[in-house]
Each structure stands twice: as C-alpha cells, then as structure tokens.
Amino acid sequence: MAKTQRPCLIVGNWKMYKTIEEATAFIDSILPMLDKSSCQVMLAVPYTCIKPLADKVKGTPIIIGAQNMNDAMEGAFTGEVAAVMLKEAGANFVLIGHSERRTIFQESNAFINRKVQRAVACELKPILCIGETYDEREQNQTEQLLKTQLDECLAGVAKDAANTVVLAYEPIWAIGTGLAATPELVGSALATCRKILGDIWGEKEAMKVPILYGGSVNPKNAETYLSLSENNGLLIGSASLAPDSFAKIIALRQNAAVATKS
Ligand code: PGA
C-alpha cells in the first residue's frame, strides 16, 4: 500500500552518450512503452540534447535535465554552463556531484555546495549524488563519509529546499562496474541518509526528500531496490541507454505499485 504513496523517480543518466539524432530516436521508441507510468521518468542528457528533447517530450511522462552546471550566475568560465541557461533550454533538474565529476574533475564538497545553492535559487531541481569508495566501505567509514558529504554539500541550504532537493546514494564501487550493492546494504545506507538529513533539516523536512539508489541497476535487480521501504527511485547509467531496458525498469515499478493496491 505504501508503495503507491511513496514518490518514485526513475532517472536515466546518459553521461557522454547520444547525439541529438540518437537521443530523438530513443524518445520515439520509448514513448509508446510508457503509457501508464506510475513514476516520474527523468533523463539527464548531454547539453546539446536538452533543448530538442525538452521540446519533444512536452506533454509526455518524461522530463529532461542536465548532468552538471557551474555555480556562478554567469561569467568568464570558458566551457561552463549556468543554471539559468539550462532552465531556458528546458532542463527541469540537474545532477550535482556525480562521482565521475568528483573523481575525474576533482569537484569538492564546497564547490558542489555552491552549485546546490545556485540550483535551488534558480528553481532548477538538484539531484545531489553522494557515496563512498570501496576502501571507505571496507574501513567502515561509510556512515561518517555520508555525513560529511551531506553536511558539507548542504551547508547553508535552507530547509525549505527539502521540497526541491533529491538525493542519490551511489556507492562509487558500484557505478559502471556491474557490482550492484546488496539490497540490505542499500536499505541501511538510505536509512542513514534519511537520518542525517533529519539532523540537518529536521525529521519532517527530511521525509520530503526523495532518496534514490544508483550503481549497476538493471532490469534484473531493479525490483529489489524499488521494494525497499526507504527507496524513492533509481539513478541509472548504462541500463538507461537502451529504450527496452529502461522501459523494463519503469514497468517494474508500475507492476509493483499495481500489485500493492488491492
Ligand atoms: P551505472 O551508472 O548504472 O552504469 O552503474 C550509474 C550512474 O552513473 O549514475
């Protein structure tokens, strides 16, 4: 029963894949499979695809977002993109602090914090990504790491933002590796995140924040994560690139929701 009431966000992260032509073909093939979607379907696409896809998906269950943004309003930052530009192009949300940004592009919690603040101020929904490395987990540092990331990335963000911010728990060792985390581990990490959010914003506000799991999610393992009581959806990389596998995951949620209705 609770499943039908919990928000469910299924977010695809296309990373640096798909030209506009390929992205358009993806939308053409997935739309007929999404009729009775009971969840919010979101696609974080390359910058070049935002405008054409946002125009194309108007009136459908899909919303389009970006994978990154700069923290400044505007300025001499060659190669960067501002929140207002993403919004104007049709983006509804933005991934912030994805582990590939943190590790490959050395993004710090302080920089990510400024981006979250800017996104909130510009009314662009931030999906804040956090998660531990393999070594941190082995050394039992996961809880402390999640606390540090949340404390630092949400510093100075007013609790009203709980109505806007989405959190994605993505253990770094599970991203793109095929080593999906066990449901027990995910359930406990999501509960930890919820508790830390409660310490930051208060329990009531913390309950409003959708918390997603990401890391090697595929049509075979998605259902176990969707059925966790703390879970509000999924952030999916490689399995979001093909319409069939992405639609299969969305349908799992549909079936789960229908099954709990009676
Ligand atoms: P993956 O990527 O599903 O391919 O592991 C997840 C992500 O990068 O968010």
Image (spheres, rainbow, N blue to C red):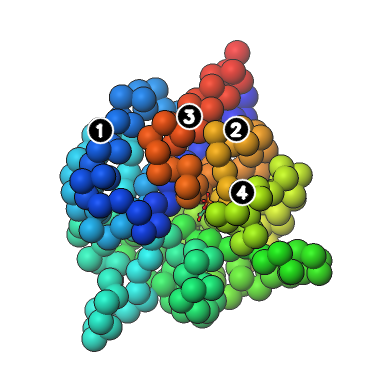
Mark 4 close to ligand 1, CB under 8 Å: yes
Return the residue at label 3: 248
Q: Are marks 2 and 1 in contact (CB under 8 Å)?
A: no
**What is the three-letter code of the residue carrying label 1?**
Asp
Residue topped by disc 4? 178
At label 2, counting other C-alpha atoms closer than 10 Å, the crowd grade (few under 14, some 14-19, many 20 or more) is: few
x, y (%) of residue 251?
48, 26
| Residue occupied by mark 1 | 28
SS label for mark 1 = helix
Whichever of callouts 2 and 4 sits on the residue coming sooner in the sequence is 4
Q: Is residue 2 above or below residue 104?
A: above
Cα distance in 3D space between marks 2 and 3 = 9 Å
Q: Is residue 209 above or below residue 122?
A: above
Mark 2 vs 1, N-terminal side: 1
Q: Identify the disc placed on residue 220.
A: 2
Q: Helix, strand or loop at disc 3?
A: helix
